[in-house]
């Protein structure tokens, strides 16, 4: 069961559920590509098999870390508040009531625009939430917040 489903108040409806973008897997994919290149190079220089094996192990660890980070991060919009949760055992949550939100900033790089991910910063009355980095479909998130 998702975190947001456990904390919904009576009469509160989930409008948008988001998470980190799949781009968090890129370091693992690049390490695995290097492992395959080293394995291919091992046909010419056999000691590269050890390098390929080491790179594959590191790539698997990086993939698991990215998967776990993505699995334990939630970005949700309800009709009453915005909820950002990350972590599993050591959980960090931020909740902002909708009536306290002044603006939602979306920062996207060139690649972020092409792949549809970015950083979201919420400005509220008297407080600003630290940027939520690597969120998938950040414009959809912003539209669900500002459409109210």
Image (cartoon, rainbow, N blue to C red):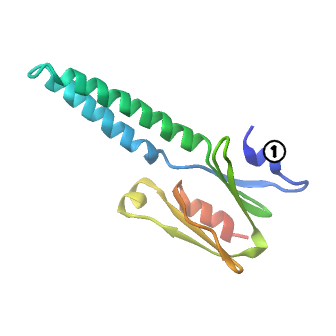
x and y percent of residue 1 in the render? Answer: 75, 37
Which residue was labeled with disc 1?
A: 6
Q: Quadrant of residue 140?
A: bottom right
Q: Is residue 47 left or right of residue 78?
A: left
Q: Quadrant of residue 108?
A: bottom left
Asked whether, in this view, residue 21 is left or right of residue 72, the answer is left
Point out residue 82 in the picture as x, y percentages from the top left corner. 71, 62
Residue drawn 37% across the image and 32% down it? 58
Q: Residue furthest left?
A: 44
* Image coordinates for residue 70, horizontal then vertical, percent: 55, 43
Q: Is residue 92 left or right of residue 65?
A: right
Seen from this angle, which residue lies furthest right?
10
In the rendered view, tell whether residue 112 sits above or below residue 70.
Answer: below
Mark 1: which secondary structure? helix
In the displayed structure, 45 sits above or below 8; it is above
The count of marks equals 1
Q: Nearer the viewer, residue 38 or 136?
A: 38
Residue at 33 percent across and 28 percent down: it is 56
**Label 1 CA crowd tier, 10 Å (few <14, some 14–19, many 20+):** few
Residue 110 image position (x, y, % from top left): 36, 63
């Amino acid at each position: 069961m998702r975190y947001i489903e456990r904390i919904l108040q009576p009469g509160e409806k989930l409008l948008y559920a988001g998470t980190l973008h799949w781009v968090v897997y890129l370091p693992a994919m690049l390490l695995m590509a290097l492992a395959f290149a080293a394995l291919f190079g091992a046909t010419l220089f056999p000691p590269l098999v050890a390098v390929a094996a080491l790179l594959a192990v590191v790539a698997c660890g990086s993939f698991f870390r990215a998967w776990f980070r993505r699995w334990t991060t939630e970005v949700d919009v309800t009709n009453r508040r915005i909820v950002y949760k990350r972590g599993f055992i050591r959980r960090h949550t931020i909740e902002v009531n909708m009536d306290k939100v002044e603006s939602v900033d979306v920062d996207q790089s060139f690649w972020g625009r092409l792949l549809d991910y970015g950083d979201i910063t919420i400005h509220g009355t008297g407080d600003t939430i630290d940027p939520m980095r690597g969120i998938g479909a950040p414009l959809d998130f912003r539209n669900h917040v500002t459409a109210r």
